[in-house]
């Protein structure tokens, strides 16, 4: 029974191409489940020269559908058209995408969400597209068995000098810090060690994967390498590297083809997280259940809206919240006990009614002024000192006030998000009694929120303030009744604004508001300030 066919099955990705004489070149049998015409040749026989057949592996990657869905959601809710293949929109060196990956936020990112890849991602700390290609290609049976990961990382981070088994191999191994990662390198090393061409090197590479051919291949390799003048130690060391690569490795082109959707999915997660999670939940392309995807979205600040018969669709959708953020609305189809058909009928019936009423929620309205203004302060190390935190809040209030005044707006709602050392977050907000753009009022509100959180002993890594409920600056007042300023501050604040408008920003400093003498520092003018 050994070495004989026991049963047959259809390859999930294999496709045979030829001209219109295809059915005359191969015996065909229908598959048992689908009834597709399948060749009776096995995967090796179809590659025999002279048959005129081309074998392809056509992979169906659900992440492509997930990203396409996210792009459609972005256009539906914002009116922006994103082309993921446009290098002007999605750059291969996008800072936010690589920052997200270096922080280990790879759940849902193509090829990088498994525990092993996540661990390697943290150690590699990718900075370029080439690093992503190496990351994806390293985590394969061949490089793992050949113990290529550790020396690659040491060379990548400059912790060990890059060495080569022989100077003749440097052209093939220079880009990967002296180790073999790609199939092209295997063929090239064979070619260099045996003084043959690349075609023969590729034939030798293929023979590595066939145990029955290994003895003859090793004898041929050692004989040719010895004749080429390589010493026994070099021959043994290189053979060990090559033999382990026979398990399974990647062609560089394969790694590049996988790294591109990896970067594109990371770009979506970094720039449009709500749409990214909606596509992920809709097409379920990852290895984690939806509850973990939803938890990751909440942890990263994406609002998750519950199912609503008046708002939910049969599919996951993005939706704009009252504070201007994009949220994910849970699909009706995911409600227990509702079939896909029932969810679709519910959504379709509601949509027809809304269109008849002229309130179609799918209609995209042109983008107006920003609904929120956000500022962030990050720290290189964990912050434990409460005074340092208060200084950060003061800097945020100053920056936020300047941005609001530049945009001629005032805010009535402040939201403070604290990011801790373990990258978890806490968000609290407070509605001001009156809209304002004045730094002291913004500062006092942030102090009040921070005090209410009780974070005096927390290890803080970043602070983010978001101002919402924006109104024209003419609606701003000079005080905040939640934490009122002194009478001198309330009296002098409009003086400060008028002086800065007349003589230029910085004429009167906010720090000088503590005493009425600040007014005397203004340059003389012919008419009094009113």
Image: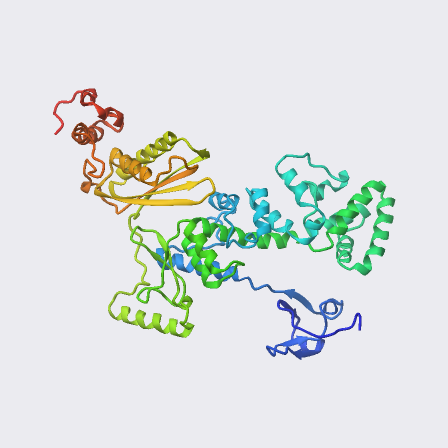
Residue 372 x %, y %: 31, 46
Please give left or right for residue 133 compared with residue 414 in the image: right
Q: What residue is shown at x 36% (from left), y 29% (from top)?
A: 387
Q: Residue 18: tell me if it is visible.
A: yes
In the image, residue 485 sits, relative to residue 523, either above or below, namely below
Residue 279 x %, y %: 45, 59
Please give left or right for residue 226 compared with residue 46 in the image: right
Q: Residue 21: tell me if it is visible.
A: no
- Quadrant that contains the N terminus: bottom right
Please give left or right for residue 226 compared with residue 181 in the image: right
In the image, residue 233 sits, relative to residue 29, either above or below, namely above
Residue 151 x %, y %: 68, 41
Residue 149 x %, y %: 66, 45
- Quadrant that contains the C terminus: top left
Residue 69, quarter of the rendered image: bottom left
- The residue nearer to you, when weighing 169 against 514, is 514
């Amino acid at each position: 029974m050994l070495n004989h066919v026991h049963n047959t099955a259809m390859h999930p990705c294999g496709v045979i191409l030829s001209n219109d004489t295809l059915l005359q070149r191969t015996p065909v049998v229908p598959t048992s489940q689908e009834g597709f015409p399948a060749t009776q040749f096995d995967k090796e026989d179809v590659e025999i020269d002279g048959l005129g057949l081309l074998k392809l592996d056509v992979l169906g990657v659900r992440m492509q559908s997930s990203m396409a869905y996210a792009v459609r959601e972005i256009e539906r809710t914002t009116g922006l058209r994103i082309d993921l293949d446009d290098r002007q929109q999605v750059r291969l060196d996008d800072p936010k995408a690589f920052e997200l990956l270096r922080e280990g936020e790879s759940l849902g990112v193509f090829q990088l969400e498994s525990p092993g890849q996540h661990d390697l991602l943290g150690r590699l700390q990718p900075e370029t597209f080439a690093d992503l290609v190496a990351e994806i290609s390293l985590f394969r049976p061949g490089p793992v068995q050949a113990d290529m990961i550790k020396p690659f990382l040491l060379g990548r981070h400059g912790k060990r000098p890059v060495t080569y088994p022989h100077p003749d191999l440097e052209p093939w191994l220079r880009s990967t810090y002296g180790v073999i990662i790609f199939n092209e390198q295997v063929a090239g090393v064979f070619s260099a060690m045996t003084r043959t061409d690349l075609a023969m090197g590729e034939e030798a590479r293929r023979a590595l994967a066939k145990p029955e051919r290994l003895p003859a291949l090793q004898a041929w390799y050692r004989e040719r390498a010895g004749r080429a003048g390589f010493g026994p130690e070099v021959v043994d060391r290189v053979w060990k590297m090559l033999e382990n690569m026979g398990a399974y490795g990647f062609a560089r082109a394969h790694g590049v083809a996988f790294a591109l959707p990896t970067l594109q999915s990371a770009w979506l997660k970094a720039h449009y997280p709500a749409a990214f999670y909606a596509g992920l939940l809709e097409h379920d392309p990852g290895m984690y259940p939806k509850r973990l995807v939803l938890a990751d979205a909440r942890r990263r600040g994406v609002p998750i809206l519950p199912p609503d018969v008046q708002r939910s669709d049969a599919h996951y959708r993005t939706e704009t919240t009252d504070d201007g953020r994009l949220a994910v609305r849970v699909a009706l189809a995911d409600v227990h006990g509702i079939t896909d058909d029932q969810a679709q009928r519910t959504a379709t019936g509601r949509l027809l009614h809304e269109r008849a009423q002229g309130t179609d929620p799918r209609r995209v309205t042109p983008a107006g002024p920003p609904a929120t203004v956000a500022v962030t302060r990050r720290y290189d190390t964990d912050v434990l000192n409460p005074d340092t935190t208060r200084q950060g809040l003061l800097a945020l209030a100053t920056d936020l006030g300047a941005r609001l005044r530049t945009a001629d707006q005032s805010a009535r709602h402040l939201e403070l998000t604290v990011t801790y050392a373990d990258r978890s977050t806490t968000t609290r907000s407070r509605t001001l009694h009156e809209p304002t753009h004045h730094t002291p009022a913004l500062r006092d509100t942030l102090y009040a929120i921070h005090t209410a959180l009780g974070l005096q002993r927390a290890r803080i890594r970043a602070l983010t303030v978001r101002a919402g409920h924006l109104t024209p600056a003419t609606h701003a007042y000079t005080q905040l009744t939640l934490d009122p300023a002194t009478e001198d501050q309330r009296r002098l604040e409009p003086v400060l604004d008028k002086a800065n408008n007349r003589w230029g920003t910085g004429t009167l400093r906010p720090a000088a508001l503590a005493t009425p003498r600040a007014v005397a520092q203004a340059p003389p003018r012919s008419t009094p300030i009113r």
